[in-house]
Image (tube, rainbow, N blue to C red):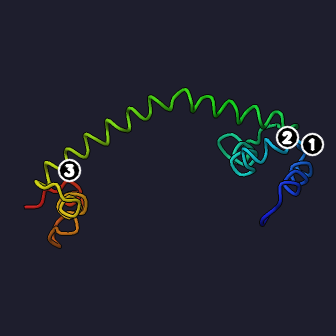
């Protein structure tokens, strides 16, 4: 498709069967973006299951629903992400027996690189090489 201006994207949407016009919808398209907005919501699951959008209002309502759902879950997801990150970091610190980033990387994160050639892939993953 190549780079297109916002006006060209609006024409492309109209040529694809989506009714879009006016300054308000143009601003919505600018704010949400073509690829995140329309292109990201064209189908459900796979490209053979196209969503039956006929107006940009329908596309924009879907974008808003998605944004609201993300906002609802964001705080809880950040809590989980932070907890998991801290648990993993503590485990790495304990296993590396060092606080330096390079030691953590060398001894724990990429320790499979230091395994003997005879080690199995599973042994390298589990860091259980005798």
Q: Who's the residue at 55% across and 26% down the image?
A: 72
Distance from label 2 to label 3 (Cα)?
Answer: 50 Å
Distance from label 1 to label 2 (Cα)?
Answer: 6 Å
The kind of secondary structure element at disc 2 is: helix
The kind of secondary structure element at disc 3 is: helix
Q: Who's the residue at 14% across and 51% down the image?
A: 95
Above or below, 118 relative to 77: below
Q: Which residue is mark 1?
A: 21
Sequence-wise, which precedes: disc 3 or disc 1? 1
The quarter of the picture where the N terminus appears is bottom right
Residue 25, numbered label: 2
> Which of the pair 112/22 is nearer the observer?
22
Determine whether, in the image, residue 111 is placed left or right of residue 23.
left
Q: Position of residue 16 (x, y in %)?
A: 88, 50
Are there few (<14), some (14-19), or many (20+) residues within 10 Å of tag 1? some
Q: Which residue is mark 3?
A: 92
Asked which quadrant contains residue 124, the reply is bottom left
């Amino acid at each position: 498709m190549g780079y297109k201006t916002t006006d060209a994207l609006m024409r492309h949407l109209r040529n694809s069967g989506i009714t879009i016009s006016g300054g308000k919808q143009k601003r919505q398209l600018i704010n949400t973006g073509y690829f995140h907005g329309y292109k990201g919501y064209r189908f459900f699951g796979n490209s053979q299951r196209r969503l039956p959008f006929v107006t940009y209002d329908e596309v924009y309502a879907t974008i808003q629903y998605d944004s609201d759902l993300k906002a609802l879950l964001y705080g809880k997801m950040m809590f989980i992400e932070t907890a998991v990150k801290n648990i993993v970091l503590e485990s790495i610190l304990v296993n590396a027996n060092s606080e330096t980033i390079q030691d953590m990387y060398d001894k724990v994160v990429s320790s499979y690189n230091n395994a003997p050639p005879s080690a199995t892939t599973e042994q390298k993953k589990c860091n259980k090489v005798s």
